[in-house]
Image (tube, rainbow, N blue to C red):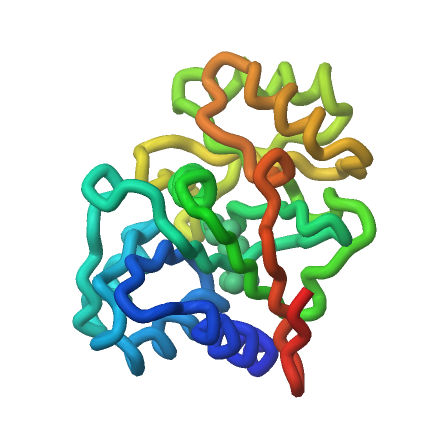
Amino acid sequence: MSEAKRLAGEKAIEFVEDGMIVGVGTGSTVAYFIDALAGIKERIRGAVSSSEQSTERLRRHGIDVMDLNDTGPLSLYVDGADECDPHKRLIKGGGAALTREKIIAEASERFVCIIDPAKRVEVLGYFPLPVEVIPMARSLVARHILAKTGGQPVWRQAADGTGVVTDNGNAIIDIHGLSIVDPIAMEAELNQIPGVVSVGLFARRPADIVIVGGEPPVVL
Ligand code: 5RP
């Protein structure tokens, strides 16, 4: 599958125009995009990054990482996804970077999503839905999720058995067992729960373009 990710990441370079500040997502597919971006780094002004992980990779390539507060709106955001439905609505956050990803997606005129074919689904929800939560609200939010969605909330753990801590210092709850027939409604409902920072449903602001990696890549 990494070959499909590479092909998707490299295809996204076609959407980068001279002088752009490029919004950059997080994950293994985006890593291929960053590596390809390095090849044209003289043509861009810099990048706005959605995670410490991507910032580190961008800087290693000598690409200037800028603050969204200084850049203002962006023309282009490129990011991966965990699931993508036929309406280009997404589940994201497998890499725990959903909040910054959502902020940059909102700030961008065009969101190009790069995926491998396995990410395409008819109905979102087979992939557990990530929710970033203020640590003290973890149990409260989990109870609300149980009552409101019927899904199973699971506190995401790191490999060492401690709770995952996001770049923003928060926890992640993954909701298992969902079949999300109305993603816009579910995104709004979960966002209402006190303590929820953001929800990994990108339905209100879906992708504009989806590139499915393959030989050749398919642009939707
Ligand atoms: C990170 C994300 C990623 O875009 C998503 O998890 C896909 O990752 P990968 O490209 O490694 O499959 O949302 O928070």
Quarter of the figure with the C terminus: bottom right
Image point (61%, 68%), residue name: 211
* x and y percentages locating residue 124 in the rendered image: 74, 45
* Quadrant of the image occupied by residue 146: top right
Of residue 164 and residue 92, the one placed in the foreground of this image is 92
* x and y percentages locating residue 129 in the rendered image: 63, 39
Image point (47%, 75%), residue name: 14
**Residue 59 sits above or below residue 152 on the image:** below
* Quadrant of the image occupied by residue 143: top right
Left or right of 172 on screen, residue 182: right
Of residue 146 and residue 57, the one placed in the foreground of this image is 57
Quarter of the figure with the N terminus: bottom right
Image point (31%, 53%), residue name: 49
Of residue 48 and residue 21, the one placed in the foreground of this image is 21
**Residue 38 sits above or below residue 112 on the image:** below
Left or right of 130 on screen, residue 103: left
**Residue 37 sits above or below residue 52 on the image:** below
**Residue 198 sits above or below residue 116 on the image:** above
Instruction: Name, please, the residue furthest toward the front.
Output: 18
Left or right of 150 on screen, residue 108: left
